[in-house]
Amino acid sequence: MRLFRPAVLSTVVALVGGLVVGAAAEGADSKVVSYRGYEVTVPASWPVVDLEKDPTACVRLDRAAVYLGSSTAQADCPAHLVGRSEGLVLAPLTAPARSTDGQLEVAVEGAGVLATAYYVPGADQVARKVLGTGRVTSKAKAAAVPVPRKVQATPSIIATRDIGGPAFDICDAPSQDTMDKWGAPNTPFHAIGIYISGGLRACGQANLKPEWITEQDAHGWQFLLVDVGLQAPCSGLKAKMSTVAVTALAQGRAAAAAAVVAAQELGFAQRSPIYSDIEHYPSDPVCKASVLSYLSGWTQELNSRGYLGGAYVSASSGGADLSSAYTSTAYTRPDNLWFAHWGNKPDLTSRFIPATSWANHQRVHQTAGNVSATYNGVTLKIDENVMDLSAPPAAVTGFAATGRNGSALLRWTLPPATTVGGVIVRRNTGTVPPALPTSGTAVYAGPSATTASATGLVGGTSYTFRTWAINNLGKYSPGADKFMAGTTSTAAASASSIMYTGAVTLSSQVKRVDTGAGLAGVPVTLYSKAINASKWTAVATVTSSAAGAVSSVQKPAVSTYYMWIYNGTTDVLGSGSATVTVAVRPAMSGYLPATLKLGATALLYGYLNPPHAGSTAYLQRKSGTKWVAVTTGKLTANGKFAFNIKPTARGSYIYRVVWFADADHQGTQTPSKALTVS
């Protein structure tokens, strides 16, 4: 637990340099502050600090005040501050306005001023009211909003790598001159704790810019990144997490997402731990559940983005609560634990935290707070720490995939200079990869392979795969992702039934399911299978048109199933169409004289092609609207049938011969034949 007695804030109440402070027209409870020709009305109780006159004054966002100007000199701040009050910072317009929860910014181009109103997150009424009173006077000099600083395209700095030994943390990032004088070998410290984000971050951080991070990294410094966000609901701070566990978890996720943005803007890459600062609280069951849920969401979100989730806690409250749930499946424990236990020996231990928990190079112990330390003639108020940390392995590279119909071949390159103990691959349907190594559907989990086959993939579905490498310490790399677009293949036939020796056109169209676009120039194969067969055979491979269309003309000898298959390619999964059936019916001819004398015999004969020797042909006569059986006969070797017809009465008769379907062919019949008996 941290204890502080900060110095009293100095107050400026007269004409100082180029600023004027006077009574406001609204009354004695407010006053007007003018900076570079920009006037704003603030509460009369807010002291005014001129940073140009007092460049080492600490810009404290935990106190109500007005700060004028900016300074990169070494600020005289306590080592650690947490909390947020209401106040205002008026500074030269050197960066675009950017508002966050706890801070509203307005770029006043007419005066060349950046106005920043800070407040307790979720309570911005006073901040908006103060900014609403601002006006530009005739004394102002305009300045355009600067072009936004380009965010480093690919953040490259890992905050902490494999490191042990002393570190210090400090509320306000020191000046470059201080960092130079405190650099090795002048001090025992190897890392510095800096507050990069969070609505309760209480120091102004004038020096904390990407250039500052890059400079310190070049001089060998490593970094403990801290976010000061919502606090335990039973704490004494104003901005608190929810007592509803599911809401607290969502709040932790949101805080982590914002912290990653802040870290990346400063240049910090994946594999960097970011610590959520949870100040001491008097724990009770509801409060404990909120903290554990918040830190679960925090860690899950950071892990899903390739960062490590850390927690900075008091050993006796957050440390004890996290330790009690270390093996619980109801919560996700932080990857690293940074605990404050002052006065304890600097050996990474605390009676509140079992030695077996966070024992895999996952600890930072804050051993003393708000200590004045002097090195090379420069004194800072710092918190002292000792570390034992290791970084997770780098992500696999070259993650590639080749689609098949119903499967995909995945391949990757393991990270160099790393003892890889295993690889995990998991998948989700759609475009969002599995967030964690326990999410989604398992594809592969085993030794340090460089390929895996994903099977059981459903046609017409897109998938996103994520692969993690695990080093010999059991630490997981950031995930490497691969999206594979699903496809659909249709199948259609120009006719569902054709005569033997006839032709049918089979067609298909192959489309991506994510865009709906046809796949142009890809090979699509037509497969066929006789309806009484067990094996599919490729009968044609056709290159698709610009719209993804293909077609093929076939002359099946027997009734046949057809199916189109697209086998996939790089980053695109294959698909198979539904089957279509083309029935083949034999050709059947019939011959019968048109007239016959009573008492004479007529011959009805014809042929079935293909012959089907020995099968039965059925002679039928029409009676009203029905056909009635007359007799049957067997087909000869050449498929001929013949029936003698001898009607017993004069009149008109209609006959036909029918052949019923077998395993190969559809049933067929002769045309109806009319016979007149006179």
Image (tube, grey):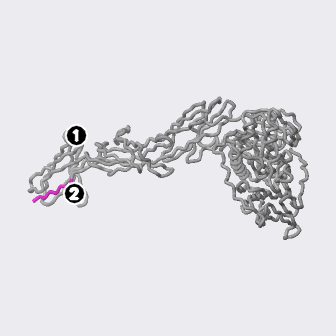
Q: Which residue is mark 2?
A: 622
Q: Relative to 644, does residue 14 appear above or below in the rendering?
A: below
Secondary structure under tag 1 reads loop
Foreground label between 2 and 1: 1
Foreground pick, 226 / 283:
226
The boundaries of the magenta stretch are 671-678
Q: Position of residue 33 (x, y in %)?
A: 83, 63
Q: Which residue is mark 1?
A: 613
Q: Position of residue 503 (x, y in %)?
A: 28, 47
Whether residue 323 is visible, yes or no, is: no
State the predominant SS element of the stretch in magenta.
strand
Q: Residue at x 65, y 29 (%)?
A: 419
Q: Is residue 100 left or right of residue 555?
A: right
Q: Position of residue 49 (x, y in %)?
A: 86, 56
Q: Residue at x 45, y 48 (%)?
A: 488
Query: Of the residues shown, which amino acid type is indicated by label 2?
Result: Lys
Image quadrant in which the C terminus is located: bottom left
Query: Of the residues shown, which amino acid type is indicated by label 1?
Result: Ala
The verdict on residue 574 being magenta is no
The verdict on residue 674 being magenta is yes
Residue 14 picture quarter: bottom right
First-in-chain label (2 vs 1) = 1
